Image (tube, rainbow, N blue to C red):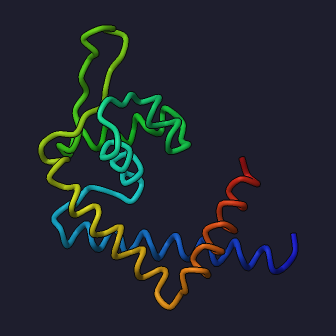
Amino acid sequence: MSTENRNSLSTISRIRESANRFIMDRLARNGAEGLAPSHGDVLAVLYRYEDVTMKDIADTIRRTKPTVTVLTDKLERLGFVYREKSRNDSRITYIRLTEQGKRFEPVFENISKELNELLCQGFTAEETGILDALLKKMENNLS
């Protein structure tokens, strides 16, 4: 691995750590103690789709089902989600937002928007597009 690649990986790691600190700070400021940045992926799926299973979430966020189970268990303990059996097939369990989870969506969106604006500060639209394409290419290289 070249020095440039190691530096890029190190930079990506530092950005992720800083972004997670930012998210944790904003969650605390908004009274969402107990939530972690990793819960955001699950919530984003639930904000987009209504009938979602653990498998759906795992496939969408590219995590293992056991990881999603741990994340969902915590969200359930914190009162953001609940489980509901399908009326048509008792083998299927849906993960649904509670009223608290639904009320949290604007906070979630604001934190995401604020972080995105901070990360892209000083970038042109073209630079942002190039960066997105390059990062997606890196992600695909690992798939």
Residue at x-position 50% and y-position 40%: 60
x and y percent of residue 90 in the render? 31, 8
Q: Is residue 76 above or below residue 88?
A: below
Answer with left or right where residue 59 lies relative to residue 1.
left
Q: Is residue 110 above or below residue 143?
A: below
Q: Please identify the quarter of the rendering in which residue 40 is found.
A: bottom left
Q: Most extreme residue toward the right, as rendered?
A: 2
Q: Is residue 139 above or below residue 133?
A: above
Residue at x-position 29% and y-position 34%: 50
x and y percent of residue 1 in the render? 87, 69
Q: Please identify the quarter of the rendering in which residue 79 is found.
A: top left
Q: Most extreme residue toward the front, as rendered?
A: 126
x and y percent of residue 137 in the render? 72, 60
Answer with left or right where residue 137 lies relative to residue 24.
right
* In the foreground, 104 or 26: 104
Q: Most extreme residue toward the bottom, as rendered?
A: 122
x and y percent of residue 104 in the render? 19, 55
Residue at x-position 61% and y-position 68%: 132
Residue at x-position 19% and y-position 47%: 101
How many numbered circles does the render carry? Answer: 0
